[in-house]
């Protein structure tokens, strides 16, 4: 669309400036654009919850075009949970409607004097009072905002958790979709910004519609033939992974003390389909439709989910087999605006602290009612929930046992025990935003055999594949496309779609290089904040304590050899820092200058 909207909440002023050719050609949009903006505009040491931090909402060049799985947007900021540069993206329909307002990105800065929300309808931009909705959950917030603006508007908002600056809070759009991780909701709450509502009438341009239609058909054919996107995800949703990961002994159970959960089938995708599924749900421009609309007894309305990560974090990680309790915890997270991975994992950490005698009166493994009650306490920051609202690392450190936090850089590890998927361990350790399966989904090759099956317990070759997937994923997040597209589509599909939309000669190699540039700029941003090899690690438990049962027994993560190879292949120093010359070669001129002149690790 060619322009960026800047909103200064302090002065209640907005301004427009162009999206430059350099930004689009070097960073595309979405995640890459947001990282570029923040690296340039945020000085070192900005407190994530201060008015000086910025929050960027960004779409990509494929958003709104109808390209397969392109109904997404990114939120980029400095995370209050991790202190790292951070992006979180979400599906649904908000991103497409934002693009149609004519803005490629929104830069939100400062702090409103009073609770406010943004109403953007094409070129009309208003900062409105949120007094009426402050304190409301995300569902009520969306309903009220739409009643005050337009019923067709799409809304991204925070719930009570974001208002209270819970460090594991999310931004929720379309009531059930989450920009979920890293406390992006807390940043929004720190700005007294309750919601962003958008409605647009502008259609993104497509330079070559005939070529675009042809490559879109080819991409859809690939999606319709791949077993993951054709059968597994449509039929069982993401929770299809529960039994898969459990069978190989890599389903983290009872806060990663075990890799096998005897009651896994009770919370599996198959059981969700049998017991609580109402219908499938799709994001904009998606034929996969992995979303689940569900309903449990005692609820007067349907919800969405739970997804794999949610049934794992509230289920196996907490030793809970009660599907209805897991689903209720999931619904409450969406209403409060909480990240289900970090919330469930932090509760699991509290359970282990309790059973080890370090948290008297705390929750215990297997207590289904506790997970539901604790979500409410965390969202309201009351009682023990006020401690858990800081995430598992701060909780564990407060009680003198940091080793019970299953996190990397302060971000809780998702539902893949790295002792059973070695490459995922390297991906977790080297992820710029903290433990994340979406930076490089090594499970695809190590477990699902996509595009080929590799030995999940060996370390050979894992560094090079991790780097490739990290680079591709950074490009996909900047287009912005769903991660599930990578099961069926490849960089050639992406490049062909981008060429048709922009009429610029992008190739697959160009996209991988752009991904490399984005990954290195994120890394330079973290280096600027003092991160290095010391933070590229995993919890002591998975490095030193082998699993005692299951098909991954007697294994620990052999991280250091993989990390040495990873740094060498990245062209970084032995301490994990990009060199000034390398950044210069990637056309990261400001980063190269700063690394050369000021920041060493």
Image (cartoon, helix red, strand yellow):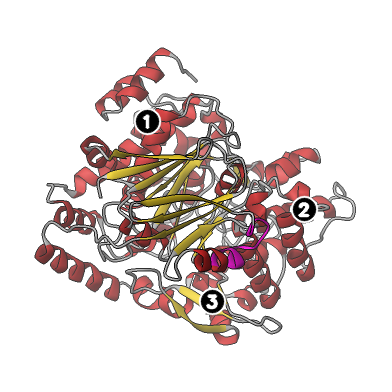
Work out whether mark 1 precedes mark 2 in sequence or the reverse, and give the earlier one.
Answer: 2
Work out whether mark 1 precedes mark 3 in sequence or the reverse, and give the earlier one.
Answer: 3
Circle 1 SS class: helix
Number of numbered discs: 3
Using the numbered discs, state the Cα–Cα distance from disc 1 to disc 2 in whole angstroms: 43 Å
Circle 2 SS class: helix
Query: Residue 214 or 53: which is nearer the viewer?
Result: 53
Does 28 appear in magenta?
no
Work out whether residue 277 can be spotted.
Answer: yes
Query: Residue 211 or 133: which is nearer the viewer?
Result: 133
Q: Is residue 384 left or right of residue 257?
A: right
Circle 3 SS class: helix
Query: Residue 310 or 249: which is nearer the viewer?
Result: 310
The residue indicated by pointer 3 is 269
Q: Is residue 396 left or right of residue 240?
A: right
Q: Which residues are magenta?
A: 132-142
Q: Which mark is residue 568?
A: 1
| Residue at (43% x, 65% y) in the render | 153
Q: Which mark is residue 385?
A: 2
Does 135 appear in magenta?
yes
| Residue at (74% x, 50% y) in the render | 388
Using the numbered discs, state the Cα–Cα distance from disc 1 to disc 3 in whole angstroms: 40 Å
- Up-down: is 364 above or below 223? above
| Residue at (32% x, 49% y) in the render | 104
> Do tag 3 and tag 2 residues touch (Cβ < 8 Å)?
no
- Up-down: is 281 above or below 183? below
Circle 2: is it few (<14), some (14-19), or many (20+) Cα within 10 Å?
some
Residue 425 appears at what percent x and percent y? 51, 47
Residue 168 appears at what percent x and percent y? 63, 50
Q: Hey, which residue is sitting farthest top in the picture?
A: 597
């Amino acid at each position: 669309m060619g322009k960026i909207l800047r909103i200064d909440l302090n002065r209640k002023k907005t301004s427009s400036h162009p999206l430059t050719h350099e930004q689009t050609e070097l960073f595309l949009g979405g995640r890459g654009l947001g990282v570029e903006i923040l690296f340039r505009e945020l000085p070192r040491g900005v407190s994530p919850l201060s008015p000086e931090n910025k929050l960027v909402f960004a779409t990509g060049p494929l958003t709104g075009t109808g390209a397969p799985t392109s109904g997404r947007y990114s939120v980029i900021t400095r995370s209050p949970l991790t202190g790292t540069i951070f992006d979180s993206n979400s599906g649904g329909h908000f991103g497409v409607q934002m693009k149609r307002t004519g803005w490629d990105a929104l830069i939100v800065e400062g702090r409103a004097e009073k609770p406010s929300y943004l109403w953007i309808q094409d070129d009309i931009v208003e900062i409105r009072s949120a007094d009426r909705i402050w304190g409301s959950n995300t569902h009520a917030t969306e309903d009220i905002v739409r009643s005050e603006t337009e019923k067709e508007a799409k809304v991204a908002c925070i719930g009570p958790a974001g208002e209270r600056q819970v460090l594991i809070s999310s931004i929720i759009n379309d009531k059930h979709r989450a920009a979920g991780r890293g406390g992006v909701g807390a940043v929004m709450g720190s700005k007294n910004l309750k919601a962003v509502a958008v409605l647009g009438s502008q259609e993104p341009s497509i330079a070559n519609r005939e070529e675009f239609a042809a490559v879109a058909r080819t991409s859809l054919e690939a999606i319709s033939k791949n077993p993951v996107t054709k059968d597994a995800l449509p039929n069982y949703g993401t929770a299809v992974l529960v039994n898969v990961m459990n069978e190989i002994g890599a389903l983290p159970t009872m806060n990663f003390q075990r890799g096998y959960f005897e009651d896994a089938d009770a919370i599996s995708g198959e059981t969700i389909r049998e017991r609580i599924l109402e219908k499938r749900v799709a994001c904009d421009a998606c034929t996969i439709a992995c979303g689940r609309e569900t309903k449990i007894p005692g609820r007067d309305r349907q919800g969405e989910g739970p997804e794999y990560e949610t049934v794992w974090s509230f289920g196996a990680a907490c030793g809970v087999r009660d599907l209805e309790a897991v689903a209720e915890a999931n619904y409450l997270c969406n209403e409060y605006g909480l990240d289900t991975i970090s919330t469930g994992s932090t509760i699991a950490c509290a359970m282990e602290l309790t059973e080890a005698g370090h948290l008297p009166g705390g929750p215990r493994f297997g207590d289904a009612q506790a997970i539901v009650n604790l979500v409410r306490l965390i969202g309201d920051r009351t009682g023990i929930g006020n401690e858990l609202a800081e995430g598992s690392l701060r909780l564990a450190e407060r009680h003198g046992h940091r080793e019970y936090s299953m996190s990397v850089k302060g971000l809780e590890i998702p539902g893949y025990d790295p002792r059973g998927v070695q490459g995922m361990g390297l991906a977790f350790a080297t992820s710029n935003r903290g433990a994340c399966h979406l930076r490089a989904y090594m499970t695809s090759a190590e477990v699902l055999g996509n595009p080929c099956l590799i030995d999940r317990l060996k370390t050979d070759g894992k560094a090079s594949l991790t780097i490739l997937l990290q680079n591709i994923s950074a490009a996909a997040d900047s287009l912005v496309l769903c991660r599930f597209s990578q099961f069926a589509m490849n960089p050639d599909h992406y490049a062909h779609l981008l060429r048709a939309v922009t009429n610029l000669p992008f190739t697959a190699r160009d996209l991988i290089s752009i991904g490399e540039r984005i990954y290195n700029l994120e890394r330079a941003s973290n280096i600027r904040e003092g991160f290095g090899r010391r933070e590229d690690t995993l919890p002591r438990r998975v490095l030193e304590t082998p699993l005692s049962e299951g098909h991954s027994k007697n294994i620990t993560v052999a991280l250091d050899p993989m990390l040495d190879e990873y740094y060498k292949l990245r062209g970084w120093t032995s301490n994990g820092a990009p060199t000034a010359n390398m950044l210069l070669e990637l056309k990261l001129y400001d980063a190269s200058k700063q690394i050369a002149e000021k920041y060493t690790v």
